[in-house]
Image (tube, helix red, strand yellow):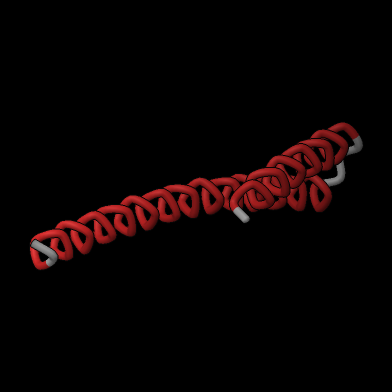
Amino acid sequence: MAIEDDLKGKVDEASGKAKEVAGAATDNEQLETKGKAQGLAGKARGAFGDAKDKVEDAAEDLKEKAEDAVDDLKSKFDK
């Protein structure tokens, strides 16, 4: 689900930021880099969730339009 992606993305962003700050504070470049990478991965996951939402909305709109078109055709032939 897109909501899960959004939530997990936010968790990864926050965890990554914490690691990044901890790495900077302790002069641990490896931890800082891992934190930055995790934060970027979290942002990407959140963006993926947003894209999924948009695709789901577009698919639902298309489905409704197709159903309306079928109903219109049926009503023309039922006359």
Q: Where does residue 74 sit, x and y in percent of width and height?
A: 17, 65
Depth order, front residue of 3/75: 75
Residue 52, how many percent across, how many down? 49, 54
Between residue 44 and residue 29, name the one nearer to us: 44
Q: Residue furthest right?
A: 26
- Compared across the picture, whether 47 is left or right of 29 comes to left
For the image, the number of numbered tags is 0
Q: Residue furthest front?
A: 79
Q: Residue 22, image x and y in percent?
A: 87, 36
Location of the C terminus (image quadrant): bottom left
**Image check: 17 left or right of 69?**
right
Residue found 13% across the figure and 63% down from its top: 73
Q: Residue at x 41, y 55 (%)?
A: 55
Residue 60 is left or right of residue 42, and the answer is left
| Near-viewer residue (51 or 63) | 63
Query: Image quarter for residue 36?
Result: top right
The residue at 53%/53% (across/down) is 48
Residue 36 visible somewhere in the drawing:
no
On screen, residue 47 above or below 73: above
Residue nearest the observer in this picture, 4 or 77: 77
Q: Position of residue 43 (x, y in %)?
A: 60, 45
**Image quadrant occupied by the N terminus:** bottom right
For image coordinates 10% across by 67% down, the residue present is 77
Q: Is residue 28 left or right of residue 1?
A: right
The answer to whether residue 5 is seen in the rendering is yes
